Amino acid sequence: MNIYFFRRPKPKQFNYKPLYYDPVKEEMEERKKALGHAEGDDPRERFRSNVRRHWRKEEPVKDRYSQSLRVFFYVIFAVFVIYFIFFTDFINRMVSFFMR
């Protein structure tokens, strides 16, 4: 038994939504999506759907570019750190500075 002082949990609700399957309507909606048509004949809706469709096509290219650029900077940073650790006396000077 749980004791609640301020906020009582709400009981779980039963959310049953009956499904209705119309194969003709589903096929028609898939054809509309494939052709890029909006649900209605409103020109603003068609314009919005065209813009969304074009933005979705361009996102993966932008994502790949940013990901490769990020990896490139990580590699450059790792090479820089390795250079400082193995080929300079920077670490020895830092250790001697803090050991005084």
Image (tube, helix red, strand yellow):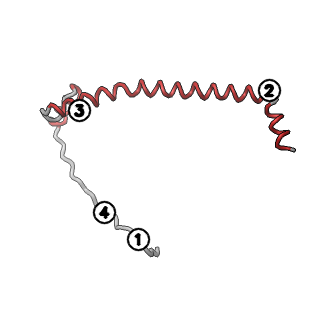
The residue indicated by pointer 4 is: 13
In the depicted view, which residue is nearer to us: 12 or 39? 39
Q: Of marks 2 and 1, which one's residue comes earlier in the chain?
A: 1
Residue 26 position in % (x across, y down) = 19, 36
Q: Are marks 1 and 3 in contact (CB under 8 Å)?
A: no
Q: Which residue is mark 1?
A: 7
Query: In this view of the protein, which residue sits in the foreground, 99 or 45?
Result: 99
Between 81 and 39, which is closer to the camera in this rendering? Answer: 81
Which of pointers 3 and 4 indicates the residue nearer the eye? 3
Residue with the mark numbered 2: 88
Circle 2/circle 3 CB separation < 8 Å: no
Q: Quadrant of the C terminus?
A: top right
Q: Nearer the viewer, mark 1 or mark 3?
A: 3
Pick whichever of labels 3 and 4 is earlier in the sequence.
4
Q: Amino acid at mark 2?
A: Thr
Tell me what residue is drawn at x 54 percent, y 28 percent.
70
Q: Nearer the viewer, mark 4 or mark 2?
A: 2
SS category of the residue bearing label 1: loop
In the image, is 5 to the left or to the right of 89?
Answer: left
Question: Could you tell which of marks 2 and 3 lies nearer the N-terminus?
Answer: 3
| Amino acid type at mark 3 | Arg
Q: Position of residue 56 (x, y in %)?
A: 33, 29
Disc 1 residue type?
Answer: Arg
In terms of sequence position, does the residue under pointer 1 or pointer 4 come before the other? 1
